[in-house]
Structures are given as C-alpha cells and as structure tokens.
Image (cartoon, rainbow, N blue to C red):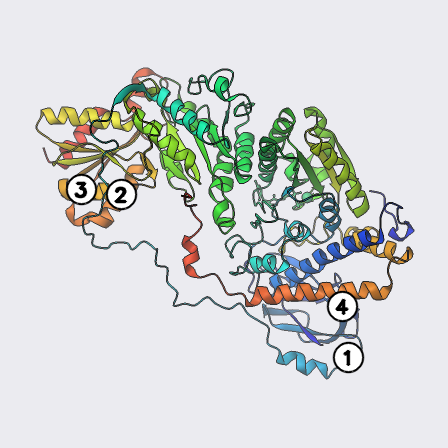
Amino acid sequence: MATEILMPALSPTMEEGTLAKWLVKEGDTVSSGDIMAEIETDKATMEFEAVDEGIVGKILIEEGTEGVKVNTPIAILLEEGEDATAMDKASEQPASAPVPADKEQSSETAPAAGMAHPAPEVDTTPDWPEGTTLKQQTVREALRDGMSEEMRRDDSVFLMGEEVAEYQGAYKISQGMLDEFGAKRVIDTPITEHGFAGIATGAAFGGLRPIVEFMTFNFAMQAIDHIINSAAKTLYMSGGQMGAPMVFRGPNGAAARVGAQHSQDYAAWYMQVPGLKVAMPYSASDYKGLMKTAIRDPNPVIFLENEILYGRSFDVPDVEDYTVPFGKARIWREGDDVTIVSFGIGMTYALEAAEKLAEEGINAEVIDLRTLRPMDTPAIIKSVMKTNRLVTVEEGWPQGSVGSYISSVVMQEAFDYLDAPVICCTGKDVPMPYAANLEKHALVTTAEVIEAVKKVTYK
Amino acid sequence: MAAKKPSAKTTPSNVSADELMAYYRDMLLIRRFEEKAGQLYGMGLIGGFCHLYIGQEAVVVGLEASAKEGDKRITSYRDHGHMLACGMDPKGVMAELTGREGGYSKGKGGSMHMFSKEKHFYGGHGIVAAQVPLGAGLAFSDKYKGNDNVTFTYFGDGAANQGQVYEAYNMAEIWDLPCIFVIENNQYAMGTSTKRSTHSPSYWERGAAYGIQGEEVDGMDVLAVKAAGDKAVAHCRAGKGPYILEIKTYRYRGHSMSDPAKYRTREEVQKMRDERDPIEAIRSLLLTGKHATEEDLKAIDKEIKGIVNESAEFAKESPEPHLDELWTDIYAELEA
Ligand SMILES: Cc1ncc(C[n+]2csc(CCOP(=O)(O)OP(=O)(O)O)c2C)c(N)n1
Ligand SMILES: [Mg+2]
C-alpha cells in the first residue's frame, strides 16, 4: 500500500519548517534508516530518515519550500511492485491526529478559590483522654521511643545515616538502637548524602521502609534531588504503581552559633512539594506520635526536628502505641483576641508572647500546626472567624515563608472576618550571622510577636 | 572498537538456534518499535523529549537473557528498549509515549518516566545518574530480604561522570549489594564525546578504586553481552557484591528527536551501521549457520511489524487520560 510521508515534527516546539533539501529523488528505493531529506526546524537543520522500505513514488513538496506545516504530506512511498495509481488512495487516508480529551470534563477535586466559607469542620478531640497517665520525657527520648517502637512492630523499617549506629547518633537520638536492632537495621553510612538518600529511596521502591537521618537538614541539600525528583514524584509518574514509603529526618533550622551554612529552616521549601508530607513538631508527645505516624505512612515524609528542642521535657502519655494524626493542629491556648499560628520551635516564641500578652489582658489563641503538609488550615480559619486577627510565627526567611502561604489562604477563605492585615513574624532576610548578638537578632523574637499582636489588635 | 564484518563470524557451539532466533526477534522488536516511535513523534503524536535506543539493542537483549524472575532493572530516560526487553507490553509503552490512558503510567509519566511493578522495571529516570543510587537501593532491598535477586542498573557514559555514581559504588561495595552497574558507553553524552569529557574513558576501571570488579564488553555483539551478563549475575548471586559491565555501544539516531547531531560525521554513523550492526550480525549468523532461511526471517519481520503497528494503533486510539487523573496518585493511602 502506498503511504504518505508527512512533514515531521523534529523538536518539542516545532509547528512548521523549511524543506531544505531532498536527498532522494522519485524512483529511488529507500530502506529504513536512509536519510531522505534535510529539514530546518525552529532550532536546527535536521536529517530526516526513512522508516519504511519502499520506492519514492512522488515528491509533493519541492525543496526550498518554507513554512511547511507539520503533518503536511511531503512525499509518497510505494511498495515494491506498486504503481502510481496507488498514490491516489494514499492521499485519501487522512493522517491521524490526537483525539482531544473531552472538553466538558471537569475536575471535581480542584480547589475552588475565593468561595464564601461556612465555619469549617475542625477535629478538636484532645490528643489523649483525660485521666491518661503522663510521664516527663525529652524530645530526644520521645523520638527514639517512637522509632524503636515502629522497628519492633515492622521488620522492614530500618535507620540509616551518618553516625547513627556505633557513635549512637550525632545528637544521640539513636542511643541504644544499634544494641537492640543490630547492624543490619541501624546502619552507619559514609558521608555521602546524595548517595545514601538515593539508596534509601531505591530500597523504599523495593518494598522497605527506610528512616534516613540527616545529621542536619542543611546537608540534605546535597540529597534534595532524590527527595523531590525520586521520592516525591515517583508515585505520580508511575500512575500509582510504586512510591517511596520512607522518612527523612534530622535537625532543621538554627541551633546556636553555628553560622549561615548550618542554620537554615527548610520548612517552607519542603512544604511546597506535592508528594511529600512535612511534619515539624514542637512537643515531645508530638515528636513521638508523629514519628510513628510518619513511619507507617506510605509516602515520603520530611520530619523536621530542632536541636534546641531535643533536650526539652514535656508530658508524654504513658500508653501503648501513642500516635498523632497528620493534618490536625493542636490548640495550646484558647483566646478571643488574636490567633497566633506557629509550629516547631516557633511555638516557644508564640507561647511566651501569649503568656506576656495575657498579663496585659490580651487573650491569644495559640495554634501549633504540627504538620505543614497536610496543613490544618480549617483550624486556622475557624479560629480567625472568632478572633478576626492573625499573626504567624516561624524562624525561616520572610519571602515565600509558611506564614505568607497561610495569610494568602486566610485572605481567600476568610477575608470578611479579618479586622486587620495578617502579620507574619519570621526570621530576618539575612544569612545567619555568627556573632551572638547578631544571631539573636536574626531570629524571630518574642518581642516582635508581642508587637505584631498589638498592631493587629490596635492596642 | 575494531571494525569487523559480522558475516565473518561463526556460531559459537554453546548457542542454540532457538537462542539466536530469540535474540534476533527481541532486538528487531526494539528497532522497529523505536522507528515507529520516531515516526509518531514526527506526526506530533509523541511530545517532549523522546530518546531512541536504535543501535544499542544488543545491550539489553543480551543482559535480559542472563536475568531470572525477580531480578530488577532501572535505567535512564533512554528506556524503551529496556521495557520491551523485560517483557513489558509494547502497547502500554507506546500509549505512554503518546500520553494516553492505556499507557503504563496512565499517560502521566511519558517517555522518560515509565514503570512496571509486575516486570520489576523501576523506571525511566530523567535526572542523569539518579538511577544509579536508586538501583543500588533496590539491590539493598533484596539483600535485606535475604533473597538472591540482582538489580541491573543501567547508565550512560555521560552519567558515569556524576559524583553520585561513585557514592553508590562505595556503598554497594562496603555493603556487598547484588547490583550490576551497566555503563552503556555509546560514546556520546548529547553532543559531548567521551574524549572531551574525561581523561580516562575506560569507565569500568574506575571500579578498582572501590574494590569492584568489572570488564569491558563489545555491545554490538549480543552473544558477548550475554556471556558477560552471565558472569556478572553469577558474581552477584553468589553474594560477592557488585559488578561493573562497561558495554561499548553506539546510538545511530540523535540524542533525542531534536538533536541535529552535528558533533559527529555521517560517515562515522554509516560505518557503524554497515559494519557493526548487532541485528545484522545475528541475522547473518542465522543464515550462514543454516539455522534459518530468508523466509523464516521474513516471517519474523512480518510478525514484528504487526506487533509494532498494533501498538501504534492502540497508542493512537487509547483516549487521553480523564482530567480527574490530574489529582490522583499524588499520595498513597494507608492500607487498613
Ligand atoms: C542532572 C542532569 N543534568 C543534565 C541533564 C540533561 N541531559 C539529559 S541526557 C544528557 C546526556 C547524558 O548522556 P549519557 O549519560 O551518555 O546517556 P545517553 O544519552 O548517551 O544514553 C544530558 C546532559 C539531565 N537530564 N540531568
Ligand atoms: Mg552516552
């Protein structure tokens, strides 16, 4: 059967081109791989190869013709023994074009922007029932308990990272874990973030549940390609066939006097990525409960810890299998005058400010987001509907901050309830300085939070 | 690589006629499939980047012949051949290329990002060399589980200059991971020849720095690839850790569809095609060894053409994904 040879698209953006030169003439026999013509695309001059065997029956577009649209017939190829009458038949067969998807289709799950909002449903059940026995634990102990409990529960969970095993953890988070679980499941890696993040992600593809400890998240920048391109996107790219059930964890944000390269808060970075979940707990019970949830989650979870919080003690329920769900904020303090939203170490400023404000008669509601993706925005909206004022608190940089996202959501969903502009208290827009006085000033301060609250309450 | 007339060879005694026929068929399927993909790209049915495997067929066909059920494979964006060779359905692959619902990733991955859990094909990766630690990680999972599966981790000569390759080598060796690192050295990374990108383009030798054994293999000879594959697989299955195969091969087409390939001469390509073509080599072994007649081979050609046309028809007719698919597969649900 005679076939039409069509003007090919030879780049992702080409719509038309110049048929610069024919390298075959009518009557020539061609076989697959032979170069038939030179075609100038929007980018370059390309050689155009024959795909099928046959005889060039007719050249339809002269060489030198400019502006030949993609898919225009440029020649007719005959099979051996065919004559020119077959050519008419060829031109009757229209070249197939992609079938457009039904334009009527609409996506039901697309978020509707700017809609008037009835008071959102918010889960306000307490983390533990009244009367639960509590014990005092440091964040460090709570984290270790969370990981160890899950490793006892599921053989496919293992911990890998620099100094996690024999050294007992650079920050002593994995103390005792090598003894309990052995070198097969508590694995010291060489200093090779890019490589071991990739190996762990591959192991997750292969059905294991790795916990990857970064000595700090600053070093995860060398691994961010695997975190995002390999771990977060594979479920989608594979049409749901395989993903990366794993946890990337480690201290994040400023420690103390370690300078610009060791002090960055990555909350806003990771929070942006679909496919990742992001937890940034404040209290020990949340470190434990969210860590257990993170390990069981079938998706890659970024677990942002804080070195300064590691040594702090909190109440932790003394119960078997204590977990905290993702996407559920915790209200630490109820109040009517202003909503303060924070997470992670930002909570220390938020709570301290609220206490001082209470002495002055201003009652702040303080919300700890606990996870940033999913984010419990309904809890924020509901609170703002009551207080009509919002201040956000974080240590990270101002441009593209977590607070700026929250304020855009509140503006779109609760604009009519706001009595003052939202103020985002953040770290300063500078690399972290080393000098003690400068460092203190570079971070967000309690005084700034108090000042912001006074501004939005017009006090 | 010494240029040899393929017809000068005789069939090695340990290779059966059936085996030769299978290699011929599998390589031809890849070649015809890729030619068809090129054609569909030209018609605007395939978009974006599309990297063809034409010329390199003997690499995957030879190595897949050494694999057993349970073994894993992972590669770069130049992945169509790997998928066909491990038994994935040409229809599903082609429909992914056209971005349709019937594609392996429901049209959401495209040419560079395709997967098959069933065939243990772990992608399809668009970031040069990312698949190398990922492949070591797949091998890690098998070692952890205590089975004897191996992982074939394919990457290019260009990828071989990425730091993460050596990070993966280092850990694969200290942890004895059953990973075969397969360097498909087709002599170019886009437009950069190996001579211009490294002082010593003998990539397999770099394994020595990490204590990993390896060898160079003639990738235009499927029998040589199969023999090397058997050796590497035996090494890994025996728990002796990773192995490196540097397979010298050649891509006939441009790097991707939009590459005018000005960095090499037409003669260089033509010489390879004429003298070293892996499919022609097997074809002439089959004929000179009287394992098959011209008629037999014609029948195979016809059968392959049928399969490929069918895959193209399927890829054209399969509908575009429903818009709801935009919002699915972002997160996996917790199994109760
Ligand atoms: C990290 C990264 N850098 C650059 C690119 C763009 N790029 C895609 S393929 C390629 C060349 C790779 O060559 P090679 O590894 O030899 O593989 P081949 O294409 O020859 O199979 C480049 C530079 C990329 N995809 N990823
Ligand atoms: Mg290459």
Residue at image mark 1: A82
Cα gap from disc 1 to disc 3, whole angstroms: 79 Å
Residue at image mark 2: A377
In primary-sequence order, the first of circles 2 and 1 is 1
The answer for which chain carries disc 3 is A
Q: Quadrant of the C terminus of chain B?
A: top left
The label nearer to you, 2 versus 1, is 2
A311 relative position to B129: left or right:
left
Quarter holding ligand 2: top right
Q: Is residue A36 visible?
A: no
In primary-sequence order, the first of circles 1 and 3 is 1
Residue at image mark 3: A384
Cα gap from disc 3 to disc 4, whole angstroms: 72 Å
Residue at 58% from the left image edge and 31% from the top image edge: B144
Please say if the residues under marks 3 and 4 sit with CB atoms less than 8 Å apart: no
The answer for which chain carries disc 2 is A
Q: Dot 2: within a 10 Å radius of its alpha carbon, few (fewer than 14), some, or many (20 or more) residues?
A: many
Cα gap from disc 2 to disc 1, whole angstroms: 70 Å
Please say if the residues under marks 2 and 3 sit with CB atoms less than 8 Å apart: no
Cα gap from disc 2 to disc 3, whole angstroms: 10 Å
Q: Amino acid at mark 2?
A: Thr
Q: Which mark is residue A53?
A: 4
User: Can you give x and y, in whole percent of width and height, for residue B325 in the image?
Assistant: 44, 56
